[in-house]
Image (spheres, rainbow, N blue to C red):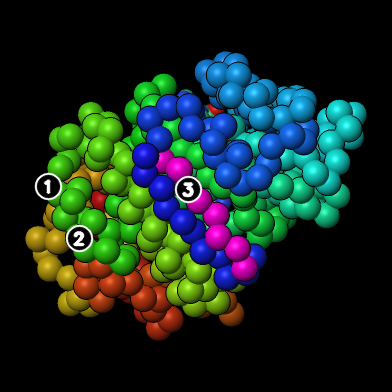
Amino acid sequence: MDMLYIKTEQAEKEYPIYIEDDFKNLENAFSKAKLLGSKACIIADTNTERLYLDEIKKFTEKCFSEVCSYVFEAGEKNKNLSVIYDFYEFFVKNGLDRKSVIIALGGGVVGDMTGFAAATYMRGVKFVQIPTTLLAQVDSSVGGKTGVDFIGNKNMIGAFYQPEFVYINIKTLDTLPYNQIAAGMAEAIKYGYIIDKDFLDFFKNNMREIKTLDSEMIKHIIFTSCKAKAYVVSKDEKETGLREILNFGHTFGHAVESLSDFNLLHGECVAIGMLAGLKMSFDRGFIKQEELDFAKRIFEFFELPLKAENFDKAEIFKQMFSDKKTKDNKLNIVLLKEIGLAYTEKNVDDKEVFNAIEYITL
Ligand SMILES: NC(=O)c1ccc[n+]([C@@H]2O[C@H](COP(=O)([O-])OP(=O)(O)OC[C@H]3O[C@@H](n4cnc5c(N)ncnc54)[C@H](O)[C@@H]3O)[C@@H](O)[C@H]2O)c1
Ligand SMILES: [Zn+2]
């Protein structure tokens, strides 16, 4: 059993992340968090319902006086306030009160929405995350950001809210389509680039085993990713400074993501975006040619896209300015001083951005 304690400055509390091979320890986790006895509601999407809801119910029913479940249709398009309204209605109908516990069973969409509903229902009820995608396990379940999309703007309505614990069963990855695994891998590799060179070396030395989802390797990846994200976030909970480095690859990536009409996965766009960020870092003389080349190799190995093919360069450039992270119409771009050391560059020249875009489109 691997376990990691996450410190959160904002909530002045600590919570554990369990990294397991099955769901057997779930009962113990509820007990340790002193959540036994009350009512619980599991939120799942149509995929996690089909795959895991019965099993989770089996374990939770032993722990709570009553367990109900609410299922919504899978997909980012349902990450909106009208589905949250349905959650609230269901909570009221089922008599959930301030002592009730809400459990998120799914990827980042379920986690973000459930966290937001838990943060706001009766001004806050306890919640637990059971992330079932690699992206949710290495990224979205840590850091306390919850929320929904609003009239075309991603994550515009939300709250910072921490779970009581996060329970990861790595075997849930066995049912996840490979492109979703690769997308999560891109976010994990990102931590190597921004903060932990050894972690990048780990990927370098174990690529093949990692791709077969070797249990020990996957656990190491999840553990190290959660630790890296928790470290960055705990230093800076409200995104004033250090947290920005988590956006490495994201300014370029988000632009490509919106222009693709969301046909590319977020993690795939982040891989393309990281290549652009690495190219800018290379052009400034911060990283070596072989380091830039290696990034291409590793993304290619994981079958991530290396280019935004058939995209218009000027469109990407324009789109980068409509990202909510642009301040005073000036781009802030996360670059690497060296591998494992990211910083936010505020003095960015249009020409170098254009060169980087050229690198990911040609
Ligand atoms: N809160 C944060 O800090 C944070 C960080 C990054 C991303 N996010 C959010 O996370 C969301 C993306 O998360 P995601 O990539 O997990 O998407 P997702 O939740 O939509 O899951 C992807 C797909 O996989 C399915 N699925 C989930 N688990 C499965 C399993 N074990 N086997 C088979 N299929 C499974 C889902 O039903 C869905 O169809 C976005 O909305 C993004 O904004 C939040
Ligand atoms: Zn991301």
Q: Is 328 drawn above or below residue 70 in the view shown?
A: below
**Cα separation between marks 1 and 2:** 10 Å
Foreground mark, 3 or 1, reads 3
User: Disc 2 designates what residue?
Assistant: 198
Is the shortest distance between ligand 2 and the CB of mark 2 under 8 Å?
A: no
Residue 266 colored magenta? no
Q: Are marks 3 and 2 in contact (CB under 8 Å)?
A: no
Of 237 and 245, the residue lying toward us: 237
Q: Residue furthest left?
A: 290
Residue stretch in magenta: 12-19
Q: Main secondary structure of the magenta part?
A: strand
Q: Which mark is residue 17?
A: 3
Is the shortest distance between ligand 2 and the CB of mark 1 under 8 Å?
A: no
For the point 69% across and 37% down, the residue is 36
**Would you say 271 lies left or right of 11 here?**
left
When asked about the image quadrant of residue 15, the answer is: bottom right
When asked about the image quadrant of residue 253, the answer is: bottom left
Q: Quadrant of the N terminus?
A: top left
For the point 75% across and 45% down, the residue is 117
Q: Position of residue 139 (x, y in %)?
A: 46, 50
Element carrying mark 3: strand
Element carrying mark 2: helix
For the point 33% across and 58% down, the residue is 191
Q: What type is the residue that disc 1 sits on? A: Asn
Of 249 and 162, the residue lying toward us: 162
**Cα separation between marks 3 and 1:** 26 Å
Q: What type is the residue that disc 3 sits on? A: Ile
Q: Which mark is residue 205?
A: 1
Instruction: Give the mark nearer the N terminus: 3 vs 1.
Output: 3
